[in-house]
Amino acid sequence: MKKAAVIGAGASGLMAAYAAAKNGNQVTVFEKNEKAGKKIYITGKGRCNVTNDTSAEGFLENVVRNAKFLKGCAYTFPPEKIMRFLEEGGLPLKVERGNRVFPASDKASDVTKCLERYCRNEGVEFHFQECVLRLEKQGEGFLLVTEKGEYLFDCVIVCTGGISYPATGSTGDGYTFARRFGLKIKPLRPALCGIVCDMKEISRLQGLTLKNVQITACRQGKILGSFFGEMLFTHFGVSGPIVLSLSSLLNETQNWKEISLSIDLKPALDEATLDKRLLRDFEKFKNKQMQNALDELLPKSLILPVLQQAEIPPQLAVNSLSKEARNRLIKVLKGFRLYPVSLRPVEEGIVTAGGVDVAQIHPKTMQCKEIPGLYFCGEVLDVDAFTGGFNLQIAFMTGYAAGSSIR
């Protein structure tokens, strides 16, 4: 039996604590907040998208960085095992669009309760409102210093999260610990966040939600990524599920002038089919102005920006529209342009990209290769994935890998 400390009572910390205690170890969890899972409470808009009902391969396809590092974990503790684990712990689940898995109750708090119950049943001790100030090697073990005392442990699992949503306690403590041990930290960047755009053409679109559209990012003509689904226009630019995923492919951008974004407003229609649709609508509204002839095709607030990009005067009579102008309109409908400027700050990212360089971490156990007994799990590592429950899946399976390897 070993004395193990877990720093952080989030998704990875709770899973690590349970797995370590299940192996017969004496486990103590230190959490700076007054309760466990504070970031879990805000995930999925308070509903908590716990994982994605897909295979290990399907999960790995949705990992943005260092999927190879996670391969072993993905097959050892894939989504189906996470789902079974939660349901056996008294948390009924449901699967929604995109194979996203939620608690049947739609309450994120039930996820935390389930994980904490697992821990307590295995004898895990919790120290809430106790912030770890310092962590250092001492002999064969580790000295852990908080504002309330000093503790000695055989091993320590760091599950402190990133620097996104600092109000939840994710203030980068894990990176500080890692640096003090001489570990390399990959640059920290926002992941799964909104994209700031030049607002000149789209300021009137604030609050507009688009469904079933396709957004594509290119760098100097080369496609970087493309996502289908829902997005929205905001006071700073664009956000929503497909924009969040796209942002994770853009967060290493140095020169935003090289990046172009476009929205296919009618991805179900090719240009020829869309042209036929326009001709039918224009025959119906032939005596109207262009600004009043697209109501059945587009949200009202989007009509003027689309016409502006197509260089079609809003007051132009429909029966005066040339074939050339109609072709320009089709091009804009299939590729409405946005002009990205930057991403939103890392504090607003759903997760933090970058972190502890995984080259220093054993992929099967999450243990430091050069510092036996020191483990890093979850968001503190340089791993991240798209939206859809994949980041919580990373937290669960890396926490499980670490905890279950301690004997």
Image: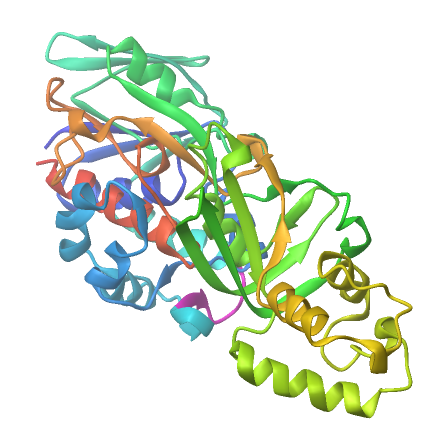
Residue 51 shown left or right of residue 318 in the figure: left
Residue 127 shown left or right of residue 335 in the figure: left
Query: Does any portion of residue 123 appear in the rendered image?
Result: no
- Above or below residue 97? Residue 365 is above
**Pick the front one: 144 or 60:** 60
Query: Does any portion of residue 48 appear in the rendered image?
Result: yes
Q: Where is residue 272 in the image (x, y as percent from the top left)?
A: 54, 82
Q: Position of residue 393 (x, y in %)?
A: 32, 53
Q: Quadrant of residue 276?
A: bottom right
Residue 308 shown left or right of residue 30 in the figure: right
Q: Residue at x 68, y 63 (%)?
A: 209
Q: Does the magenta stretch include residue 169?
A: no
Q: Which residue is drawn at 56% across and 55% down?
A: 262
**Pick the front one: 110 or 73:** 73
Position of the N terminus by quadrant: top left
**Pick the front one: 348 or 45:** 348
- Above or below residue 81? Residue 165 is above
Specify the segment rendered in magenta.
Answer: 100-108
Q: Is residue 102 magenta?
A: yes
